Amino acid sequence: MLGTPIPTPVPPTPTVEPLVLDKTAYTDPSRTLSFFPPLSWDLTTESEGYVKFTRPDGAAWFEGAVESTGYTLTSEDYLVYVENLLDSLYGNTMEYQLLERNELTDRIIVASTFMKGEQ
């Protein structure tokens, strides 16, 4: 005799709190980066042209960096350099998503998101 299966309750989907940015802009010591970091996140790394803010529980981070080749490159070579750099940094990450890419005459600004490890 077969019984009626008892349904297994589905756990609720966790609610992700919205990211709130600080109202005070952060500027790195070399004055090459300036942005509004996430509110209440910890400044964990700071050097010339690089900064990292980490969520208090350590589960996420926000980083900014200025990358320079040190060489004069043609526009085409610089684009190849940027693509290779992004591929080497994020090519093997989970769920990499390009959020924004601005190609200016003297620099390229990239904003992206990705998952680290098994998160």
Image (spheres, grey):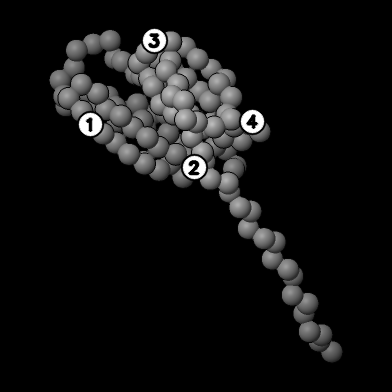
Quickly name the residue at label 3: 30
In 3D space, how far apart are the residues under numbered discs 4 and 2 (Cα atoms)? 22 Å
Q: Residue furthest bottom?
A: 1
Residue type at mark 1: give it: Glu
Which numbered circle lies on residue 39?
A: none
The reply, left or right, for residue 11 in relation to residue 80 is right
Quickly name the residue at label 4: 56
Residue pictured at 57% horizontal, 38% vertical: 117
Residue 48 position within the rendered picture, expressed as x and y whole percent measured from the top left: 42, 11
- Residue 112 sits in which quadrant? top left
Quickly name the residue at label 2: 94
Q: Considering the numbered disc 1 on the image, is that residue within a helix, a strand or a loop?
A: strand
Residue type at mark 3: give it: Ser
Give the mark nearest the N terminus, 4 or 2: 4
Residue 3 visible in the picture = yes
Give the mark nearest the N terminus, 4 or 1: 4
Which numbered circle lies on residue 103?
A: 1
Q: Nearer the viewer, residue 20 or 103?
A: 20
In 3D space, how far apart are the residues under numbered discs 3 and 1 (Cα atoms)? 22 Å
Residue type at mark 2: give it: Met
Give the mark nearest the N terminus, 4 or 3: 3
In 3D space, how far apart are the residues under numbered discs 3 and 2 (Cα atoms)? 32 Å
Give the mark nearest the N terminus, 3 or 1: 3
Residue pictured at 17% horizontal, 25% vertical: 105
Q: In this rendering, which labeled residue sits more in front, label 4 or label 2?
A: 4
